[in-house]
Amino acid sequence: MNRPIRILATASFALFAILVAAVTYHQVIVGPDYRDDPRNVRVATSQAGRERGTIITADGVVVAESVADPNDPLVFRRTYPEGELYSHTVGYTTLLFGSHGIEASHRDDLVSYRDATISGVLSALFGGDVRPRGLRLTIEHDLQTVAREALGDQRGAIVAIDPATGAILAMVSTPGFDPNTLTGSAAGATGAALEGDSAQPLLNRATAQSYAPGSVFKVITTAAALEAGVASSGTPFPNPVELELPGSTATIKNFDGRACGSGSEVPLSQAFTSSCNTIFAMIGMSVGADQLVGTAESFGFNTEVPFEIASIESRIPDAASFEFDVPGLAQSAIGQRDVRATPLEMALTAAAVANNGEIMVPYLVQEVFNSEGFIEESAEPSVWQRAMGPATAAALTGLMEGVVTSGTGRRASVPGIRIAGKTGTAEVPDSAPHAWFIGFGPVEPDPGDPQIAIAVLVESGGDAGEAATGGTIAAPIAQQVFAEFFGIGQEDQ
Amino acid sequence: MTRNAEAALLAAASVVASMGVALVNFAYGQGFDAQVALTFLVFAVSFGSIHMALRRWAPEGNPYLFPIAAFLTAIGFTEIYRLDPELASIQRWSLLLAAAVTVAVLVMLRDEGVIMLRRYRYLFLAGAVLLLLLPLLPESWPLHGAEVNGSRLWVRLDLPIGARSLSFQPGEVAKVLLVIFMASYLADRHLAMSTTGRRLGPIRLPEPRQLGPIIIAAGASFAVLVYQRDLGASLLLFVLFVSMVYAATGKASYLVTGLLFIAGGGFVAYQQFDHVQRRVFAWLHPFDDFADAGYQVVQGLFAMGSGSLTGSGLGLGRPDLIPAASTDFIFASVAEEMGFAGSIAVIAAFALMAAAGFGIAIRSRDVFRKFLAFGLTIVLAFQAGLILAGVLRLFPVTGITLPFMSYGGSSLLANMVLVALLVRASHGERT
């Protein structure tokens, strides 16, 4: 009669053993994950006042650090010495508003492990490093400063990237905010004011907002035509004043309402340099929806960019939706209708042309270093996806260089450096147009020479309002960034 | 002499409780105060009087069960005090009441021991069913049922003083009465049940005549609990029933049939009850519905994960974030503030109680005592295991209390009496 009791007693002990295993699993093995889960409000509470790693720029300027309280050396306050300049890129860590930017995505590196967790205790026992690690960004402080100043009071964004590696050289979104005001005593009121501000200072326009790209999208339309063999640089196209769209009363006109230069036919190169909507609408219709959407997707549309800070997808409707909507296809080919792109995506588009058609994965953190300054991890550049073949990239480079030397993008030119680019003036309902410039330089760099690709967006015409164009508003901003990057002072121009 | 060890351990548990209260005070910048002294006093008086009763009427009874129970009560009490000092002061009264009832039970059993319970089995059955039915009393009566969290298993007595009311969960006491009934019935019939039976294919069923009354008893209790939507207690009761029949007959087929019934019953409950579906979903995918169904489970996991090795320290964690932190999820609260060390101590304490209980059952020469000790131990171990499994995401959360630790007088009282019966059953069986 004791046998069944013994069996059930054994079963009970097995149950307790399973409970011990489960509690070990939850508290020891995955415990740190639960502890650090952003939804666990204990994290914010417990990390508040703890030391976090220092963040510096590529050239060593401190952009985020933890400063010990003079009265209590174990209590730290997070400060952002550069204030507004890195508000969207470095982001912030706050008790009230969570964390954003690099502060959020690299939280695991930046936190201190000097605490009572099992791994922390064991690590400390065995002489491990429990102090937070620091980050060196890819951003050049001077370039970032120039980019910020070039945008001035206008709403917009600039993304500058090294096309060969994907390293982000500058990333600005305006208006910004001073992250220091989100950690102080008045943080609640400041944060509420920022959230309610109609200019949306908390929005990272570089990655988390998308805009009609307008004519800068013609780079992709041209790539599609070149890849499909529909056209080459010299291919002549008819030159109407106004293009009637099949199956609709809508027409497409050029920006100035005139034909694309003189003559009844113009070559693709001239159409590109002058950014003729009529001809690119024709090209869009002749390459077809499949090719146009396919090329846009290979440039990174309709996919989330693998990036360290929160980004949204750039969108183009799928090819099937254009089957009975040829006007839609024509308008999409000139970057209007439902095409939307983030400044980050357009910077990658320029970088793809610069990098023989390959898009590198963009990244912001060059190195992770420990508390003693030794480098523990370094970024390894990797290819994200191929946008187009090298021949197409080479042909596009020629076309884009023409834009800067003799076309709409002349104001982006920098003496002594071959710059390629494309302007865009995207029409938006109920607002002044968005001014765009994308480009890169130098064209055909010598091996080892630094190269930069850039996207500039000025929202709703910026200071110029309705009169704004990509060439007048965005190209000069790009010019300032190029000049800084290539070390050409303003006085040299 | 072992009773001296018991006295020392009970005194130690009282110190644990009062020092726990002091630590919580320290965390809030206060020091020793009346709460510390009062807690020590209540624990010392409660467990001291039980100890004196045991010295007098069960001197050879197991000396470890009450110290472990006192330790668990102390840990639970500390956490309750940390979460809500007002609940803690109610819990102190509950402890005094539970101790008084426990002593009263020991007094009643002073001459014949637990053997006398065997005679009144149908009284206990009737009592159990009556207690289970109490929550169904209409709301308008002074003594009435009340629904909490979708299950109707509370009884509330409205007191004439102000708007106060006294609530209790009669199901907690009913489970002890049902163990006594089943132990008594099976002690009479186990021989007949294990030798006769009919075959139905490969399954051997007992004579309905033998098993009938117990099936009716268990079925009635079961039906009432399902009607009240207290599925945790239904499961506990069913496991108890199957385990006791298996222990009495030694036939594995009962065990298999029982497990099949549990699986089938669980499936039907899942199909029929929304709140069961919610809890199953919260168990399988707690993070998918973080804000709603999964919230409690996830907060429990966050609490345990944040506790880590040695815990945040009493009063320094955030167990207040967990819904039902002082009742169903008291374990997660303890795990957060006392860490992995505290969790293991609690599980080990329950395992030790189960070991002592099963030991008493195995050593008992008298079958009634054997079945009684076995049934009581199963109830204790399985109840603890079931809610711990819920908190630890091994099983859906069933709204039952963690014995000795959860806030609640009915649970504390029932489990103290349960342990008293176990200790009394072990008296005189030691060789």
Image (spheres, rainbow, N blue to C red):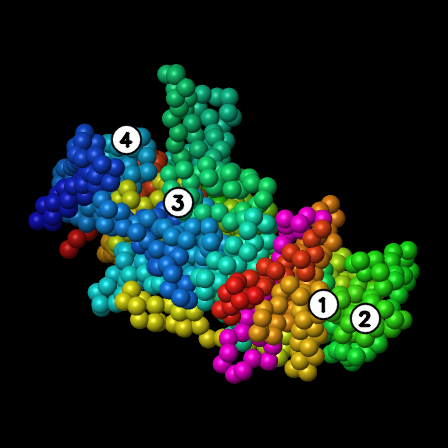
- Residue A407: x and y in percent read 72, 67
Among the two numbered marks 3 and 1 on one chain, the one whose residue lies closer to the N terminus: 3
Which chain is mark 1 on? A
* Spatial separation of the CA atoms under disc 3 and disc 2: 53 Å
* Spatial separation of the CA atoms under disc 4 and disc 3: 40 Å
The structure residue drawn at horizontal position 45% and vertical position 47%, both measured from the top left corner, is A178
Q: Give left or right: position of A151 versus B171.
A: right
Q: Nearer the viewer, mark 2 or mark 4?
A: 2
Q: Say if A380 sits above or below B70 in the image.
A: below
Identify the residue position indicated by label 2 in the image.
A283
Question: What amino acid is found at the position of numbered circle 3 in the picture?
Answer: Thr
Question: What amino acid is found at the position of numbered circle 2 in the picture?
Answer: Ile
Q: Nearer the viewer, mark 3 or mark 1?
A: 1
Identify the residue position indicated by label 3 in the image.
A183
Q: Say if A91 sits above or below A416 in the image.
A: above
Q: Nearer the viewer, mark 1 or mark 4?
A: 1
Which chain is mark 4 on? B
Identify the residue position indicated by label 1 in the image.
A407
Q: Dividing the image into 4 quarters, which one contains the C terminus of chain A? A: bottom right
Compare residues B420 and A306 and report the one nearer the observer: A306
Label 1 secondary element:
loop
Label 3 secondary element:
loop
Q: Nearer the viewer, mark 3 or mark 2?
A: 2
- Residue B62: x and y in percent read 19, 49
Q: Give left or right: position of A170 versus B364.
A: right
- Alpha-carbon neighbours of circle 1 within 10 Å: few (<14), some, or many (≥20)? many
